[in-house]
Amino acid sequence: MRFQRVGLRYGNGPEIFRDLNFTLAPGSFHFLVGPSGAGKSSLLKLLYLAIRPSAGTFSLFGRDVAGLDREEIAMLRRRMGVVFQDFRLLDHLSALDNVALPLRVAGAREEQVRSHVAELLSWVGLADHIHAPPATLSGGQQQRVAIARAVITRPSLLLADEPTGNVDDAIAVRLMYLFDELNKIGTTVLIATHNESLVQRFRHPQLRIENRGLRLTAPASRVTA
Amino acid sequence: MFFRRSDLPLDRDPAGGFLPWIVGFMVYLAAMALAGAVFANGLIDRWRSDLTDAVTVQILPNAEGETTQDQAARVAAAVKFLTDVPGITSAAPVAHEEIVRLLEPWLGSGNIIDDLPLPALIAVHLQPDAAFNLPEIKRRLAEAVPGAVLEDHKPWLADLARLARGIEALTLLTLVLVAVASILIIVFVSRSALAQHQEVIQVLSLIGARDAYIAGQLQAYAFRLATLGAALGVALAIATIFAAAKLLGEAETNLMPELGSLSWRWLLLILPIPAAGVIAVATTRLTVLTQLRRTA
């Protein structure tokens, strides 16, 4: 993933980013930190192709995103897992069906879907809530469903927006280990978080948003900013 | 396609609830138009088969007080003349009772018919595909038998053919209008579903759903509703046709073609069901793909 002089503003609004230059190497793990309103969610939206930069160039998995059509964007998104800050679970589906969505969308066989999803939901502590609709789950449980949905396909890139914001510390640590495990098998991970204790405990490089730019604030073993 | 799992909560759409009913009414209209065309064509075919390879000769009554025997002699002379013409397979006088029966719908069954000077009729059958110079035969017959007029059915057949073509055109127009109206309503329902489920569709898109996947979900939904509506419409149409057939049968008219002999044509009535399915799928796909591209 490579940003070159990327700028972003919404319509005629204020500039969110100016001249962002950074590269995330495959298999790296970064925290994305910064004060509220600094643009963490906007940066993630750029990365999961929900918005386009208003300036500069940005390539993902070696492809310049500027010229991609909807079909190509869909194919790139299948290589990503995204945990949205507001979860974006589908209320009319069960936890199992929510987590199964990325597999079904990609055309996986139904018997594979059910066994993989049930196993993952057990792993995140929701074995007893497989058939529960999201509305009946607590905020923390919904967040775990959202995380399970993001990781079910073992994506090449995992983007998470405050993925531990609604869970207690023990669950947060458990989820971080899940992200670490994914990272060990090759997934590039970028987690936007306010949770300083997690950032300190898991000692991954930090990308800090400051003054409409990015600054690397931890040892840059696999990142150049 | 009927029982496909859906990621979109489409069954809760208020607009979708109306779709089977609207399609049902449309299909009812289409089926009735088709039935009308099949009925009319059957009737026309029957008349045509009665009239093809046949002509009628009228022996007009003589105004100078001709006796029945004199008229019978002219009929016999005309029959002899006709049977001598090569290619005419038969020439048989129509019984007086049959002529009275044919006139009854117009003149009633009272004494009026008995008092009227009626022409005698001769039914003439021609050898199929034989070449005839009917104007020449007509002229020679009129010379040989005074008051004999050969009635050629060709102008009638041409009128019937025009009528058949007219009925077919009207049916086609009705079918096209019904199809266009159905397409418009399906476009409306698809757009409404897209607007209503915008957030869900956005989530599907963000997790990698191609436009065709999203369109597929709406296609399955539209197919289910449209074919259900079409089946209702066809069922209602068949019930109406059988009720009409029964009524016509009870009226003892001989206008009704026999249903049995036209059975393959009545199969056309089932056509609106797959047609509604195909229209629903194609329209929904086109609408959804276009809308998704526009909102990108």
Image (spheres, rainbow, N blue to C red):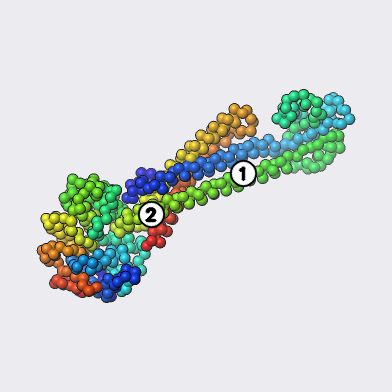
Task: Give the residue type at disc 2.
Answer: Leu
Please tell me which residue is depicted at 68% across the width and 35% down the height of the picture: B50
Residue density around tag 1, few if under 14, some if 14–19, many if 20 or more, within 10 Å: some
The location of residue B107, given as percent across then percent down, is 74, 29
The location of residue B233, given as percent across then percent down, is 48, 40
Label 2 to label 1, Cα distance in Å? 40 Å
Residue density around tag 2, few if under 14, some if 14–19, many if 20 or more, within 10 Å: many
- The answer to whether residue B198 is left or right of residue B51 is left
Circle on res. B249: none
The location of residue A160, given as percent across then percent down, is 22, 61
Pointer 2 or 1: first along the chain: 1
Front one among B88 and A9? A9
Please tell me which residue is depicted at 19% across the width and 50% down the height of the picture: A138
Q: Quadrant of the C terminus of chain B?
A: bottom left
Circle on res. B194: 2
Q: Secondary structure at mark 1?
A: helix
- Location of mark 1 (residue): B167
